Amino acid sequence: MKIVVYGLGNRGYRFIRDIMEILPEIEIVAVTDTYMQKSESKKYADIPYISPGCIQKYEYDYIIVTPENFYQEITSTLLDKGVDQRKIKSLEEFQKNRKKFYCNICESKIFAWEYIGEDYEIFQNKSIAGAGKRRGGCTVCGSYDRARFVYDIMKNFTEIFSGNADGILHFAPESTISNKLKKKYGEQYISADIMEGRADVVADITKLQFDNEQFEYIIYNHVMEHVYEEKKAFEEIRRCLKPEGVFIFSSPICWSQKTYENNNAITARDRIKYYGQEDHVRLYGNDIVDRIEEYGFDVNLMHCSEIKSEDKIKKFGFLKDDSVLLCRKN
Ligand SMILES: [Zn+2]
């Protein structure tokens, strides 16, 4: 198939990039009429471009009009030039029946995941699940790959959504998951964060203000790698969990090495170098299960590629090495 992409604004560029990466069999020609945009398109990708006046000399299956606000205007200009109306599509119309991905959180079909994460050197040398630049953002609700996987685990491997949990604490809550829990549980659900305004209450992980055995579930996703006093944090989780209560844990994990902590890494630059993020204080590794079990939990490691088929991982935009640890207080 050959398409003409009309307009090289942000939407046009993003669309070309998505097509090249997701549907590489489609041949693209770009249409632009300003020199500025031409030079940018060169920088962006090595695609041929033509001026609007030359469209009719070209053979193509569709013209995709990418500017949202000028769609009507451009379409009538094209019709005046004798372009077949059936060949003119808006970006949304073209994508509509070509959405191969699915967001389990907002239940939307997705054409292409958005790029998220940072492109630091450590991610080229080490494979760290749940970090690094990748296609993982939902274009509808903004959820990340790791949030979609945690949500899948919570839904299919715990009774949070199917049953009636007696108290839930969710620290540094992902808004997409938090909204669902709040809707189901009301005041039985408490979200917390160390910063004011980010959740229902402000809380210090190493000194929680909650009662002994108050919660049936405590959820910390991508939290513990920020916490120096890990032991204190786990003691507090244990104290606030009911007997047999479950702590839901996830974080970036490097499976090719043991957990790494370097007390000399205190600058942002060093932390990015060693851990992949400026405010992390350790990089968890393949000893993670033993590490948490020592704090008094029975850990069930849910590793994505062990419980999901390749097709499902692709469709739902999960990370194959992502993990969620269901840690039952013992
Ligand atoms: Zn979504």
Image (cartoon, helix red, strand yellow):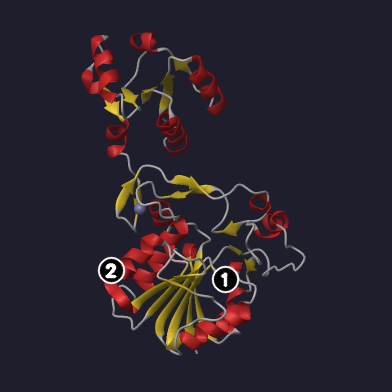
Nearest to N terminus: mark 1 or mark 2:
2
Image coordinates for residue 209, horizontal then vertical, percent:
48, 82
**Residue drawn 72% across and 58% down?**
267
Would you say the beta carbon of the disc 1 residue lies within 8 angstroms of ligand 1? no
Q: Can residue 174 be seen in this view?
A: yes
The image quadrant that residue 69 belongs to is top left
- Quarter of the image containing the N terminus? top left
The image quadrant that residue 260 belongs to is bottom right
- Asked which secondary structure carries label 1, the reply is helix
53 left or right of 193? left
**For the residue marked with disc 2, what is the amino acid?**
Lys
**Residue drawn 68% across and 49% down?**
121
Which of these two is toward me, 32 or 83? Answer: 32
**Residue drawn 45% across and 85% down?**
241
List the residue tagged with mark 1. 224
Outermost residue toward the left in this view: 85
Q: On screen, 178 above or below 12?
A: below
**For the residue marked with disc 1, what is the amino acid?**
Met
**Residue drawn 44% across and 88% down?**
211
Q: On screen, 171 above or below 132?
A: below
Q: Is residue 290 visible?
A: no
List the residue tagged with mark 2. 183
Distance between mark 1 and mark 2 Cα atoms: 26 Å
Mark 2 crowd level (few <14, some 14–19, many ≥20, 10 Å Cα): few
Q: Are marks 1 and 2 in contact (CB under 8 Å)?
A: no
Mark 1 crowd level (few <14, some 14–19, many ≥20, 10 Å Cα): many
Outermost residue toward the front in this view: 196
Residue 127's mark? none
- Asked which secondary structure carries label 2, the reply is helix
269 left or right of 315? right
Image coordinates for residue 144, horizontal then vertical, percent:
45, 55
Image coordinates for residue 188, horizontal then vertical, percent:
33, 79
